[in-house]
Image: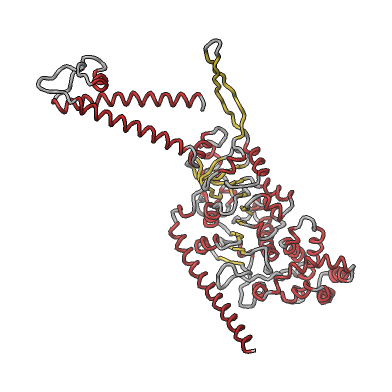
Amino acid sequence: MGQERRSLILVGVMASLITLGLGFVVLVEAMISAACGQRPQGTNPIAALQLLVTGSTAGYAEIAGCAFPVTAIRVTAGLILLAAIAAAIAGAIGYARWKQTDAAFVAELRRRPGFATRSEVRKHLSARAVLRNARTLRPTLTRRPTAADVGWPLGESRHVDVYVSIEDSVVLEGPPRGGKGFRVLIPAIIDWAGPLITTSTTNDNLTATYRSRQQRGDVHVFDPQGLSGLPRTLRYSPIAGCEDPLVATQRGRAIIGGTALGSSGTNGEWADAAATVLARLLHAAAVGGRQVSDLYSWGSTPGLAKAAVEILSVDGTPGWGDGLESILDGDPKLLSSMWFGVQSAVAPLAIPQVRDTLSPTGADAPFDPAQFLAAENTLYLLGTSSGATAMGGFLSAMLDDVVEIARKKALSSPGARLPIPLGLILDEIANMFRWDALPRIMADGGGRGICTFVVLQALSQAETSWSAAEASTIWSAATAKILLGGAGDAAHLRDIESLLGVREHRRTQRSWNSDSMSHSTSEHHERLPLMTVDEIRRMPTGIGLLTYRNRRPALIELDGWIERHDAKKITAGKTDLEREQQTFFAAEEAARLARHSLAASGDADE
């Protein structure tokens, strides 16, 4: 305990004793006045104390015809003293217990020098701060801009609403069940004022935001694995547009990059070779008017891919047919290794449900990225990267298509910026697919109006999908980093500790000299970490640590979406969609049981 704190406690104790003493004087004279009808006159300054301690009334002048209620006064004062002592003990115990709580821990952190002050938060992280560049960020906005038009809402710090500019790439890191969706993502999805693509492996974000986003524009759900529980979702053809060899090349790379082979750090050369083959197959399917069923056949077996060679030789880009033929006629061992990635990419097409999702018919309105980018529309990408129906490759391709169109549109727009910024809220993307373009988009997308918000459970999770260098690029390119408590990677937390910097700490030390029978006081100045590894890990739920550009870090309070003013409206929309999902899944389960029963009865007849 520091010298200043000890001095404050001593002053507090002295003030409490003085207050208690004055209270007893008032008590004594008030009870005498009530009993005798007039205020007693003291003959010495400690008359009340003398009466309370000894029971003597000699300190007061006698009042004719009235006996002082000494016993009642002393009993009442004793009870008050006992109550005061009990209250002090209870207060001390309560304070000691409070010191062990999360609230005390956060309060102590906020008192430390080194965190952003209220004035700094207002200057760099407030609604007023992000609105300074509103004319540049939203040049076509006809109404008066709001903070949500040009900033990501994050929470509150020192009673100031915190926003970071949409120019800033954001990384949110927090463990599972740490409140990332409930406290940050759902509000960000609802408030985003522009076209938005968001990814997820679960329905949580979808159910809470679907109805709200419908009020802004068209909502599309690309859900090949049937995770959403919606009876009608978007259909997307991976072949469409691949007549252009550049599109075919980009899409082949995106599909392979989104598979397990693309995420492998040791098989990069085979991933590149597989992407080349798949690009040629996509091009052949596009120029030959073929379907995804043909793409599946060609990609499953090299022998069947010779049909693609014939199409490319006649209608394809010059040289592509010969190139594919040379691969097919090459070393069988190399062909087997190369074709492994192609087979993995097209494997989901063996499942009728997936194949149907990737085969739009004439009745399906084609998904037009350019039209999507023209308004506050929403695209949900749902899927997982595991199991037989792993759809990471095709999810990656669709995301890549939209972002590539957005980049071209930005380059052709005034200021080389999208008129309406595109938001990418990529929740659990490392658990879904590896998107090759993410490090690049994190680095330069903000200047083009492509605004990225990446959510990770841990930085090591990104290293499993991208390389360690690419994961480091993603982390470093994020000008706003939000860290939630509960992380378990000590090495990464030590990096965070270094990133936060140090604070000045003054420590007073007192020593006793027995020879001179005196004590001496010395003051030490230390440089301590602003937060230690353990303190970063211990941050309670609802508190986030924000580092922003070259500013001092800030502790932000993250309220859940149920604290919003429109929480009732969001809840109603969530309940309505959940009811629709339950009906869908119940019908699916009933159909499954019916098929099982029919199959069982057929076996019994045999």
Q: Is residue 515 above or below residue 170?
A: above
Residue at x-position 45% and y-position 63% = 572
Q: Position of residue 266 (x, y in %)?
A: 79, 56
Q: Quadrant of the C terminus?
A: bottom right
Q: Position of residue 155 (x, y in %)?
A: 52, 47
Q: Which residue is outermost to the bottom?
A: 605
Q: Position of residue 576 (x, y in %)?
A: 47, 67
Residue at x-position 77% and y-position 55% = 265
Using the rendered view, name the quadrant where residue 19 is placed.
top left
Q: Is residue 434 above or below residue 38?
A: below
Q: Nearer the viewer, residue 360 or 82?
A: 82
Residue at x-position 85% and y-position 67% = 335
Q: Is residue 498 above or below residue 602?
A: above
Q: Is 94 positioned to the left or the right of 382 in the image?
A: left
Which color scheme does this rendered protein use? secondary structure
Q: Position of residue 213 (x, y in %)?
A: 52, 61
